[in-house]
Image: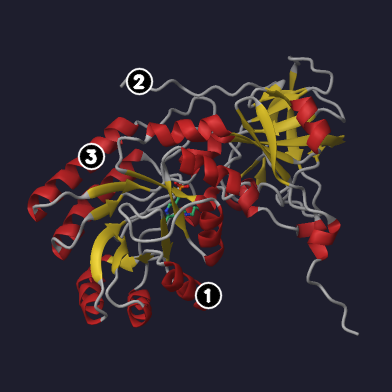
Amino acid sequence: MPAAAASKFPLTVTEVAGQPVVELAKKFGTPLFVYDAEIVAERVADLAVFDVVRYAQKACSNLAILDVVRRSGGVVDAVSAGEIQRALAAGFKPGFAEPPQIVYTADIFDRETLELVAKHEIPVNCGSPDMIDQYGAVCPGRGITLRINPGFGHGHSQKTNTGGQQSKHGIWHSQLADCVERAKRSKLSIAGLHMHIGSGTDMEHLSQVCGAMEAAALSVGSSIHSISAGGGLPTPYREGDKKVDIAAYYELWNGVRERLAAAFGHPVSLEIEPGRYLSAEAGSLIAEIRAVKKMGDNLFYVVDAGFNNLARPILYGAYHPMAVAYASGKSEGATQPVIVGGPLCESGDIFTQEDGGYVRSRDLPVAAIGDYVVIGVAGAYGAVMGSNYNSKPLAAEVMVEKGKVHLVRERQTFADIIRGEHIPK
Ligand code: LLP
């Protein structure tokens, strides 16, 4: 495989997903998420060496995105009753076919979800010993998979590290033998194992999972027919970031799979469960500049999107590439250091911040009210983490496919925001 090129993010753009930014903004309003269906499809195809590409839909669960994943040959992970229902609404089939099209992965069953997985025959990936007992009580005889916490983890932020003792996720590795016994008592067979150590991690940490998986699977034995490497594949967010070496990653995991298959005397299917990798680069968030103001030495562009639309900077100090799109259609501009903030009544509503809330300026083109800021790599953990804080509506979302622009989520109305609220009489 040729060495991956370093990523480049332009500071000025006129188009997103091949469509003029100004026209998109005028037609659909701002803030606006724009998804490029082709990029999602390409990312699914990148991973085709794996037997199963299971999209962690929490990254972006718009039905249109799920539909693209399905048409591209991917299947789906669900972490809640709502995500199971989304998967069904997007045309994924329930049931225990190999590979199952929908799998419920979580650390608990709430009552609604337990009912749903029982009724629709949704396979379950148990992330705690209690789930085994609870599932066995309603669905004896079924196969399950276990999510194991291997005792270590890593993520782009401590908040996205899902392994080790400080994490609530998965079954602690040394309790695996006990869980095999629990499963037997509940007449459940352990058909697979799963490990996901964190999100936005790196190859070095991801690779450490291989050894832990091999040992765990050998200890369970030949009931194992599938292993899942989890998600966590990194995505380029900064100028110069390299793409992940999928071929090298696959080789490591394929080695584990082949050794297990040889030990068990039957094939073992190899799954990967990416969220960010499939949708992050496909999405951009367009916001309009509504104020350009000087605060002492600092210059601010205050835009109409805030952390109610993209929470990653305030939550993790996450970096997103940004570009200016000029209302005039001009394609270049001299740069200046600016801080980009949103409209919310909260000082942390700043897109250019680092972990700990430290505000940083960034060189962006000189721009004025009415120009746009396009926040890139916003297709994962963007719209899905949106909120109605400050009574702001959830943003509209459009998807571009084969040169056509489709509105895939209407902007919320005020009536949507207050639906279900009542003043006591
Ligand atoms: N599988 C499991 C069991 C997970 O918990 C997650 C992410 C994934 C797969 C997908 O991880 P990915 O491939 O997207 O890294 N809001 C944070 C990310 C939280 C991820 C939670 N679980 C962010 O914006 O970075």
- The one nearer the camera, 319 or 304, is 304
Q: How many marks?
A: 3
Amino acid at pointer 3 = Leu
Q: Earlier in the sequence, mark 1 or mark 2?
A: 2
Quadrant of the rendered structure where residue 303 is?
Answer: top right
Instruction: Identify which residue is drawn at 69% across, 36% down.
Output: 406
Where, by quadrant of the figure, is residue 128 drawn? bottom left
What is the number of the mark on residue 252? 3
- Secondary structure at badge 1 equals helix
Q: Is residue 227 visible?
A: yes
The relative height of residue 326 versus residue 272 in the rendered view (above or below) is: above
Q: Earlier in the sequence, mark 3 or mark 2?
A: 2
Crowding near the residue tagged with mark 2, few <14, some 14–19, many ≥20 C-alpha atoms within 10 Å: few
Residue situated in front as seen by the camera: 239 or 265: 265
Q: Quadrant of residue 184?
A: bottom left
Look at the image and tell me whether residue 317 can be seen: no
Residue 409 on image: x %, y %:
70, 47
| Circles 1, 3 touching at the beta carbon (< 8 Å) | no
Mark sitting earlier along the chain (1/3): 1
Q: Residue at x 70, y 50 (%)?
A: 307
Label number found at residue 112: 1
Say above or below: 171 vs 9: below
Q: CA distance from mark 1 to mark 2?
A: 48 Å
Mark carried by residue 56: none
The dot on residue 3 is 2
Q: Of helix, strand and loop, which one carries label 3? A: helix
